[in-house]
Image: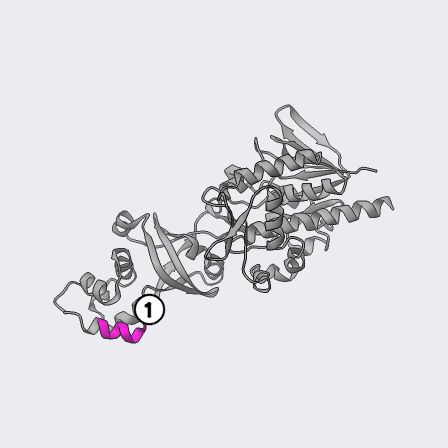
Amino acid sequence: MTKSVAIIGGGPAGLMAAEHLAGKGHAVTVYDAMPTVGRKFLLAGKSGLNITHAEDYARFVTRYGAANDRLCPVLDLMTPEAIRVWAAGLGTETFVGSSGRVFPTAMKASPLLRAWLKRLENLGVTILTRHRWTGFDSDALLFDTPDGPKRVAANATLLALGGASWPKLGSDAAWVPLLEAEGIAISPLRPANCGFDCDFSESFDTRFSGQPVKSVKATSAAGTTQGEFVISRGGIEGSLIYAHSAALRDALNRDGHAALILDLAPGRTAEKLVADLNRQDRKASFSTRLKKAANLDGVKIALLREVSPDANRLNANELTSLIKAMALGVKRPRPIAEAISTAGGVPFDAISGDFMLTSRPGTFVSGEMLDWEAPTGGYLLTACFATGIAAADGIDRWLAAKEA
């Protein structure tokens, strides 16, 4: 007998679960508060959809922090290679970039989403937009719609409402109080893969906001990585910062202060840098000496002055130590609405191994609603896809057990 499944949230996790469940013969309806589904998915593909990562799979599954143990077996359901095969089945060929990130050859999300929605339509999936979930009424679901309140009964429900980043695209965390009202303790939502405010001077902000800081190494509790970042108005952002954002955020929460250690001249050894600095004419300007000895550009030199206003008075050894290990303090993460993703959410101890809320049988959770985080690089989308499938499998087993 066909069973009805309500999926609340039309992002990657919800749509993947819909495809999986419809393929098993269930009657699936996806409800989304926005006028169209997949809005954050489309935003992620605006500058090239990073759909997964091609690094060694044994390394890949370690990227999810405290949730590794719970997510590792789930990722086997939709591995990076399986995602590439799935995309190809929708007419989207992919390639591996120089950093190991995997992108569609067309570098856009829209063709993939259009083909995906067509497949869901062919599978019989119904998508209802402008349906904002407002809570439970016993075993039924309540929605606000353009036609007024609606009450929906389904044999099983999947919540795939996302986190709290980019709320204008739909993931506004309005579900948090709804689940808390059901007695479910939610881990506080926090920004992940985010920029930070710094205590920059007004003159530095005015002159360098928007400029990239290229070819640096950054070190935090997350390890050491090389890349570049951007000076934003009052702070820092960019891929290199996102790689360290969780470590910086947690240090701020724990200690009240945090700093990113920057090597501004990663291609030069300390010994060579000392020698090159000692060779400079002391009558030359500080900037000229740094450009000739360390090949530092204007923004790097200005950063040195922001961190150490008396840097020009340091001897070669002291200046080398500053250049090779400059502690750039951060004050706070940027607001969660600006973050690429979020940490926190429904804790894993609140769900079963099948991703069902233990306090609400028949209600399942997937995607970024769950308390996990990962760096950028395709890891976020991969886990959303995989948890969508895991929850779909859990729903299928639960419905079969109820019928038996």
Q: Residue at x 72, y 55 (%)?
A: 353
Q: Residue 375 appears at what percent x and percent y?
A: 51, 56
Q: Residue furthest top?
A: 147
Toward the viewer: 96 or 33? 96
Above-or-below relation of 282 to 23: below
Q: Residue 166 appears at what percent x and percent y?
A: 50, 42
Q: Residue 69 appears at what percent x and percent y?
A: 64, 62
Which structural element holds mark 1?
Answer: helix
Where does label 1 land, which residue?
324
Toward the viewer: 89 or 188? 89
Asked if residue 152 lies left or right of residue 162, the reply is right
Q: Residue furthest right?
A: 404
Q: Residue at x 62, y 45 (%)?
A: 13
* Residue 242 sits in quarter: bottom left
Q: Residue at x 22, y 70 (%)?
A: 314
Within 10 angstroms of label 1, few (less than 14), some, or many (20 or more) residues?
many
Q: Is residue 274 magenta?
A: yes
Query: Can the viewer see residue 134?
Result: no
Q: Residue furthest left?
A: 283
* Colour theme: one colour
Asked if residue 84 lies left or right of residue 244, the reply is right
Toward the viewer: 15 or 359? 15
Q: Is residue 273 magenta?
A: yes
Query: Predominant secondary structure in magenta?
Result: helix
* Residue 287 sits in quarter: bottom left
Name the amino acid, label 1.
Lys
Q: Residue 167 appears at what percent x and percent y?
A: 52, 40
Quadrant where the image shows the N terminus: top right
- State how many labels appear: 1
Above-or-below relation of 290 to 53: below
User: Bounds of the magenta span?
Assistant: 267-276
Query: Can the viewer see residue 365?
Result: yes
